[in-house]
Amino acid sequence: MGGIGASGIILLVLIALLLFGPNKLPELGKAFGRTMREFKKGANELLDDTKPASRVDVSPEQPELQKAERRLPE
């Protein structure tokens, strides 16, 4: 099964127009755009946090950190 085709999008727009009216649609579109922007920003921040950090010099006094580096999941 494919995604929503052109006829499906037209049908959704007509239903939204009937439910909310022509005056509310621009406000709903702006709110949806803001929500998507915030979601994308949060997802990008989450992905940036999970990137591997650069190598950190570990002194011999901290062998548990050296062991932890070797056991990192793939």
Image (cartoon, rainbow, N blue to C red):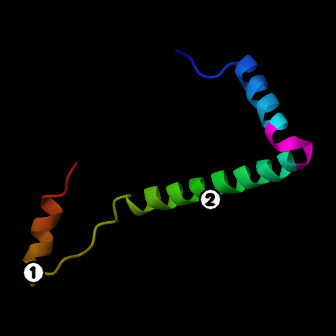
Q: Residue furthest right?
A: 23
Question: Is the residue 4 above or below the residue 45 in the image?
Answer: above
Q: Residue furthest top?
A: 1
Q: Which residue is mark 1?
A: 60
Which amino acid lies under the numbered mark 2 shown in the image of this protein?
A: Glu
User: Which disc, if any, is residue 38?
Assistant: 2
Which amino acid lies under the numbered mark 1 shown in the image of this protein?
A: Pro
State the predominant SS element of the stretch in magenta.
helix
Total numbered circles: 2
Q: Residue furthest front?
A: 19
Which one is nearer the viewer's eye here, 4 or 15?
15
Which one is nearer the viewer's eye here, 39 or 19?
19
Q: Residue at x 59, y 22 (%)?
A: 3
Q: Is residue 71 left or right of residue 6?
A: left
Q: Residue at x 8, y 76 (%)?
A: 63
Q: Nearer the viewer, mark 2 or mark 1?
A: 2
Q: Residue at x 41, y 63 (%)?
A: 49
Question: Is the residue 8 above or below the residue 45 in the image?
Answer: above
- Residue 14, position in %: x, y? 82, 29
- Residue 69, position in %: x, y? 17, 64
Q: Is residue 35 left or right of residue 62?
A: right
**Segment tinted magenta in the rendering:** 19-23
> Pointer 2 and pointer 1: residues touching (CB < 8 Å)?
no
Question: Is the residue 65 above or below the residue 16 in the image?
Answer: below
Question: Is the residue 6 above or below the residue 42 in the image?
Answer: above
- For label 1, the SS is loop
Check disc 2: other Cα within 10 Å, few if <14, some if 14-19, many if 20+: few
- Residue 44, position in %: x, y? 52, 56
Measured Cα–Cα span from mark 2 to mark 1:
43 Å
Q: Residue at x 13, y 70 (%)?
A: 66
Q: Earlier in the sequence, mark 2 or mark 1?
A: 2
User: Which disc, if any, is residue 10?
Assistant: none
